[in-house]
Amino acid sequence: MKMHRRKNKFFWYIVLALFVLVSVFIVQYRLTIARGQISNGNQPIAEANNPETNSNIATNNIAKESVTTSLEVVNYNSNKDSTANKTTSKIPILMYHHIRNYINPEDKVGTNLSVSIQDFAAQLDLIKSRGFTTITFNDVDAGNIPEKAIILTFDDGYSNFYENAYPELKKRDMEAVAYIISNFIGKDGYMTTDQILEIDKSGIEIGDHTLSHSDLSKISAEKEKNEVERSKVILEEILNKKLASFCYPSGKYNSEVMKIVESAEFKYAVTTKPGISNFVSAFDLNRYRVNNNTSIKSYLK
């Protein structure tokens, strides 16, 4: 009887030992397969991109969740990259001020900044004859960029834009961007609210040119923010839409001003630096100045 009990105990010891051995074998087999997948490049996306998980083998459920999450990140980054690619085209941006027939020897600055109506009309015809299409910054942001695109900008919001430039643009179904100094709206020589609303509805994009055309590089950070942000609020309330671009007054700015403009949720900002814009730096865009007697032929390449 005792011998029989000893045999039974021995039998169960053997069964238990076999069970342990089989369990160990299964675990080792699974680990070997998992390591083989990693070495063959079949590592889950999340693990491949996350050093914290490279040394661990995730369970099937965790791996599935990780793949889904990483794909969402990839898609998000791809969207950002595709938007960036849309804005890396080289686009000439022309900078105008006054469109008027004006010659005054005692006002050299005003004369120099004035393009005659006849010259302006001829320039628009030249732009068309060279195969260029006028676009706005909203077009750039949406990726609507034709092969030969050009942006026409008009600084300060002068009334002669409405009286002289706007009709010539409208005749030719051409777009432009008008930069408005919000505190000057309705003052003598500047566009009124009704005029701004009219041109906005006719394809002229409105941009921000600060409250009072202050030199942003020489005032306090608090005043800089007020000039940029308050003006944006005023114009957006008038237009009932978001503004896409900002224009540095007299081209004066620094890195602090650029950060304020970006934090105000503008997408682009233009300078007075000469040259073509490739949109690598969206808040530091070059423009070609068009003054009295300027030939724009060299800008239309």
Image: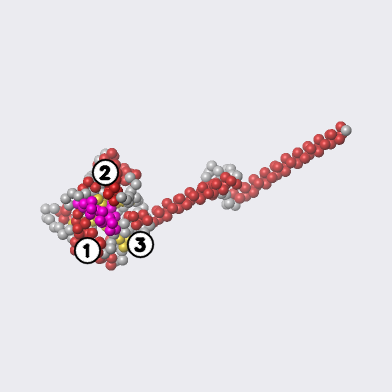
Measured Cα–Cα span from mark 2 to mark 3: 34 Å
**Residue range corresponding to the magenta coloring:** 190-207
Image coordinates of residue 282 in percent, x first then y, are 34, 51
Identify the amino acid type marked 2: Glu
Tell which circle, 2 or 3, labels the residue nearer the N-terminal end.
3
Q: Is residue 1 magenta?
A: no
Q: Under tag 1, what secondary structure?
A: helix
The residue that label 1 is drawn on is: 121
Q: Residue at x 60, y 47 (%)?
A: 60
Measured Cα–Cα span from mark 1 to mark 3: 22 Å
Judge the density around disc 1: few (<14), some (14-19), many (≥20) Cα neighbours within 10 Å.
Answer: many
> Which residue extends farthest left?
106
The residue that label 3 is drawn on is: 146
Identify the amino acid type marked 3: Pro
Image coordinates of residue 214 in percent, x first then y, are 23, 44
Tell which circle, 2 or 1, labels the residue nearer the N-terminal end.
1
Measured Cα–Cα span from mark 2 to mark 1: 34 Å
Q: Is residue 10 left or right of residue 181?
A: right
Identify the amino acid type marked 1: Ala
Q: Which quarter of the image is occupied by the C terminus?
A: bottom left
Q: In the rendering, which numbered label is found on residue 227? A: 2
